[in-house]
Amino acid sequence: MLEQPLKFFVVFFVVVEPVSLIPLFTGLTAGATGQYKRRMALKAVSVSAVILLLFALGGAGFLTLMGISLEAFRIFGGLLLFLLALEMVFARESGARTSSSEAAESRRRADISVFPLAFPFIAGPGALATILLWFGPLHLAGQAALFGALLAAVAVVLAIALALMLLADPLMRVIGVTGANVAGRLLGVILGALAVQFVLDGLRQAFGVG
């Protein structure tokens, strides 16, 4: 019972990469008041929670409606997570999270909670793909306990992201940009291996191989 929620927690934590929010949040809120920073952090996490919950509840139904098999999405999701992993390992912007034009727009916006914090940085394509990959095969009626355990794991990751944003300034002084980048690279290696496993699992299921 605990194995799947723990594995999901690791995957989801690596995908969301809350540590990367520290330099991002510090840069976007430079010179702002403490009240503004708290409001943006709380709103970003709240909006992310709503988006992720909607995908957890209705994502599988949407795929069925569109005629997309879970195996096909598992393969695509694995490839998408692999791109995110490469971005983390090489510290490059692949566009999997946000484009240069989106980044420029985010610096001009007064309200940064929905864009770019909630989407695409917290509840971005990688996080949404992860939600669909794990929640898609579940049947809420028959697997309510596992469904709730996975939702609890999502809540823990979002709580960590909120705490790191609220403590971004002192944490930034301690770990610095280099520390955040090193942590991101290490997490990227783990995510890359997990992404390849998603693709292999999807190919096995699609072709009916053991």
Image: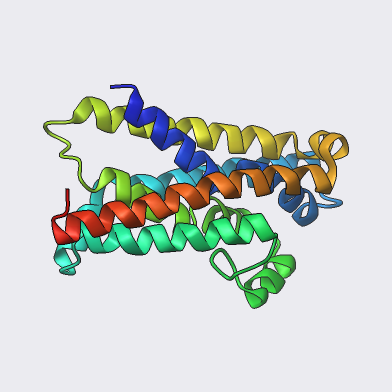
Q: How many marks can you see?
A: 0
Q: Can residue 167 be seen in the rendering of this structure?
A: yes
Nearest the camera: 159 or 184?
184
Expressed as whole percent of the image width and height from the top left, the position of residue 177 reads: 82, 48
Where residue 22 appears, x then y in whole percent? 72, 44
**43 versus 154 height, above or below:** below
Image-based side of 191 in relation to 34, left or right: left
The extreme front residue here reads 210
Q: Residue furthest top?
A: 1
Q: Is residue 48 left or right of residue 67?
A: right
Q: Look at 55% across and 32% down and name the residue there.
A: 159
Q: Is residue 148 left or right of residue 96?
A: left
For the N terminus, the quadrant is: top left
The picture places residue 117, in percent across and down from the top left corner, at: 60, 54
Viewer-nearest residue: 185 or 133: 185
Q: How is the image coloured?
A: rainbow
Residue in view at x 82 percent, y 47 percent: 178
Residue occupying the point 40% across, 36% down = 8
Compare residues 106 and 124 and report the one nearer the observer: 124
Residue 55 visible to the viewer:
no
Q: Is residue 171 left or right of residue 15?
A: right
Q: Residue at x 58, y 71 (%)?
A: 95
Which of the 4 quarters of the picture holds residue 163? top right
Q: Quadrant of residue 175?
A: top right
Where is residue 58 shown, x and y percent of the image? 24, 52
